[in-house]
Amino acid sequence: MLPATKTREGILSSNTVPGLMYSILREKDTGVLTLTGETAEKSVYIQSGRPVFATSNDREDRLGQIFFKAGAVSLENMLTAVERSRSEKKRLGTVLVEMGLIQPRDLMNGVLTQVRNIICSLFPWTRGRYRYVPGPLPTHEMITLKLSAGNMILEGIRRVESWERIWEAVGDLDTEYRTASGMEDLSRDLSLSLEEWTLLSHCERPIPLRAICQASTLPDFDICRLLWALLTLGIVTRSSRRP
């Protein structure tokens, strides 16, 4: 029997979220990870190592924003739906379907997008606190994301725009990279482009960051961000080049 996972909590730093998130997903654990910032609190519900749901008190994460920003619902109709949702004490998505503004399948896709956006929005966070509580999930209202743990980390890191954070993670131009043992299993379900797979092939032997940037057709910024994701997932390793 595996030992019981303990509650984990602490303060966020520049590179906390990717590593923290993957460490929980990798262990195939079940529980709730909550991140609290200055103005928002967001929770990720994890079941057997897969993110299955997420909640947020940030207004920008509300479901109605998904349909309104996509142009699926007009401003007037959205305001009407919000008012009806409040007065009838119904979920906004349910009201949008009842009003004929969206179809049931649109509601499901919208919720999936909402959950994915909430999770990925956590990766740029560098301030706040985190708390992970293992155990059975407190609600059955889960929407299972059809996204692997690896792709969740990859998508989240792709939303980080801070060069300082990326540079801190990847090291200097002489830092060498190499694919890790078992790389095939770790990257099997990863959604990479042809250029990204080609970059990974360059790392079959130790190669410095400088040479990777010269060999790849990707922009250097994207190369470094991808290497950060691959490092987090354990697909590549890095080492300082000895003089």
Image: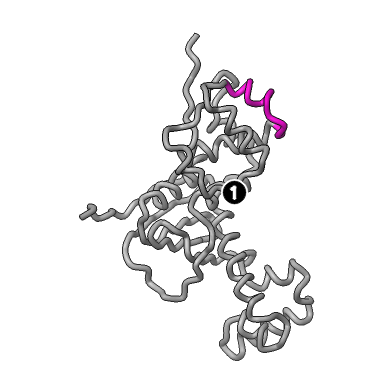
The residue that appears at 68% across and 81% down in the rendered structure is: 103
Give residue 92's quadrant in the image: bottom right
Image quarter where the N terminus lies is bottom left
Q: Residues within 10 Å of mark 1 (few under 14, many from 20)?
A: some
Q: Amino acid at mark 1?
A: Ser
- Color scheme of the displayed model: one colour
Give residue 214's quadrant in the image: top right
In the image, is residue 36 above or below residue 108? above
In the image, is residue 240 above or below residue 48? above
The residue that appears at 71% across and 71% down in the rendered structure is: 67
Q: Secondary structure at mark 1?
A: loop
* The furthest residue to the top: 243
Pick whichever, 205 or 153, lies toward us.
205
In the image, is residue 162 above or below residue 8? above
Q: Find residue 97 and report its horizontal and vertical position in percent.
A: 66, 84
Q: Find residue 157 and report its horizontal and vertical position in percent.
A: 58, 45
Q: Give the magenta part as a residue range.
A: 208-219
**Is 49 left or right of 194, judged from the image as shown?**
left
Residue placed under numbered mark 1 in the picture: 191
Q: Find residue 242 and report its horizontal and vertical position in percent.
A: 48, 12
The residue that appears at 50% across and 16% down in the rendered structure is: 241
Pick whichever, 127 or 216, lies toward us.
216
Q: Find residue 235 and report its horizontal and vertical position in percent.
A: 48, 37
* The furthest residue to the left: 1
Residue 172 is inside the magenta segment: no
The residue that appears at 37% across and 71% down in the rendered structure is: 138
